[in-house]
Amino acid sequence: MSDSIISLDDWLETPAGRYLLAWEQAQIDAAVADIFGYHALQLGLSQIDGLHTNRMPHQWLALDRLQQVKIASVRSEALLTDFTALPFASSSLDLVVLPHTLEASEDPHATLREVERVLVPEGRVVICGLNPTSLWGFKQRRGRLVRRLGQAPLFLPEEGEFIGSWRLRDWLRLLSFEVEQSEFGCYRPALRTEKWLQRFAWMDRAGSRWWPIFGAAYFVVAVKRVRGMRLLGPAWKTKPSRVVKPVSVANSVTDYSQLEKKE
C-alpha cells in the first residue's frame, strides 16, 4: 500500500476531517433531538455520536470492522455485524443513523434495503455523505487522474465511492422513503492545514447563500412511508353518537277561528 493512501479513520483526524465532523455532528444533533420512539441504531463511524441528543431508551452502535471497534470512543459498547444483514427483526427500529456508511459499504444499495426492512412505518433514517459536485469532489477526481501518472496523494480517503445526493434520492424513492430534510455544508476549499481552513471560514456563509448545492457534504433525513397504512392518533376511538328519536310536541298556539266554525 502506498503512503499516499489514507484510511477514513486517519483522514478524520486531519484538520479537514475535524471540520467535516463538526458540521455533521451539529446537523445530526439538531435532527435527532425531536425524533421519538423506543429503538435507535447508528451504523458505522464511531467518531460521531449520532444518538447523543436523542432520548430513545434503547440505543445501539453497530460497526462492520474490528478496527473500528478498537477506536470506538463514543460509546462503551459496540455491535460488530454485517450491515447488509442486521440482527434486528423487521419493523423494529424507529431511527437509523448512517454517517458515511453507504460510501464505505461494499454494497450500499443492499445496506439501504436492510435499513428499510428494520425500520418501522414512519421511522426515520439520517444520512451523511460527501458531495461529488463540490470543490472537494473536484480535487479528489483530479487527484485520481494524476495518480495514474505518478504517486500524488489524494485529498480524501481512497476507500468507498461518492454517492451524489440526487442518486441517493432515487434510491430512497425506490424504497418508499420520503425526503423530509436536506442540507448542504462545508463550503471551504480542499485545504490540508487548520490555518488555511480558518482563512476561508467566510465561504461557509457565502456558499449557503450563493451556491448552496455545491457544499462538500450533504445531510438527509428521510421517512419510511407505507402505502395503504393510516396512523391512528390518541383520539382514534370516537364516542358513539346518540340517536335522537322524533318526539311529538303539542301545538301551544290554538286557532280559535277554527273552533268557532265547528260550533
Image (tube, rainbow, N blue to C red):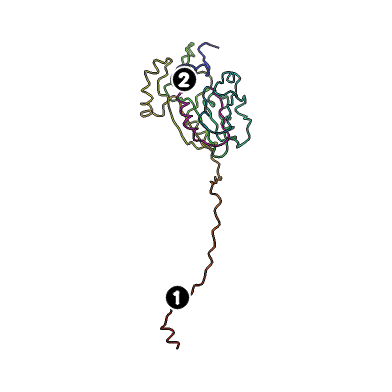
Quadrant of residue 210 within the rendered picture? top left
Q: Looking at the image, is 145 positioned above or below residue 81?
A: above
Q: Residue type at mark 1?
A: Ser
Q: Residue type at mark 2?
A: Arg
Q: Residues within 10 Å of mark 2 (few under 14, many from 20)?
A: some
Who is closer to the viewer here, 22 or 215?
22
Q: Residue at x 38, y 21 (%)?
A: 201
Secondary structure under the numbered disc 2 in the rendered image = helix
Q: Looking at the image, is 254 positioned above or below residue 239?
A: below
Question: Quarter holding the C terminus?
Answer: bottom left
In the drawing, does residue 25 fall left or right of residue 229? left
Q: How far across and down, in percent of the image, does residue 14 sit?
A: 47, 16
Q: Looking at the image, is 200 positioned above or below residue 42?
A: above
Q: Which residues are magenta?
A: 21-46
Residue denoted by label 2: 18
Q: Tell me whether the residue at label 1 lies in contact with that at label 2, contact meaning CB atoms closer than 8 angstroms.
A: no
In the drawing, does residue 100 fall left or right of residue 197? right
Q: Residues within 10 Å of mark 1 (few under 14, many from 20)?
A: few
Question: Quarter holding the N terminus?
Answer: top right
On whether residue 30 falls in the magenta region, the answer is yes
Real-space CA distance between mark 1 and mark 2, rounded to the nearest whole angstrom: 88 Å
Q: How far across and down, in percent of the image, does residue 256 sit?
A: 42, 82
Residue denoted by label 1: 252
Q: How far across and down, in percent of the image, does residue 169 sit?
A: 49, 33
On whether residue 112 falls in the magenta region, the answer is no
Q: Residue at x 45, y 75 (%)?
A: 252
Judged by depth in the image, the label closer to the viewer, 1 or 2, is: 1
Q: How many marks?
A: 2
Who is closer to the viewer here, 85 or 256?
256
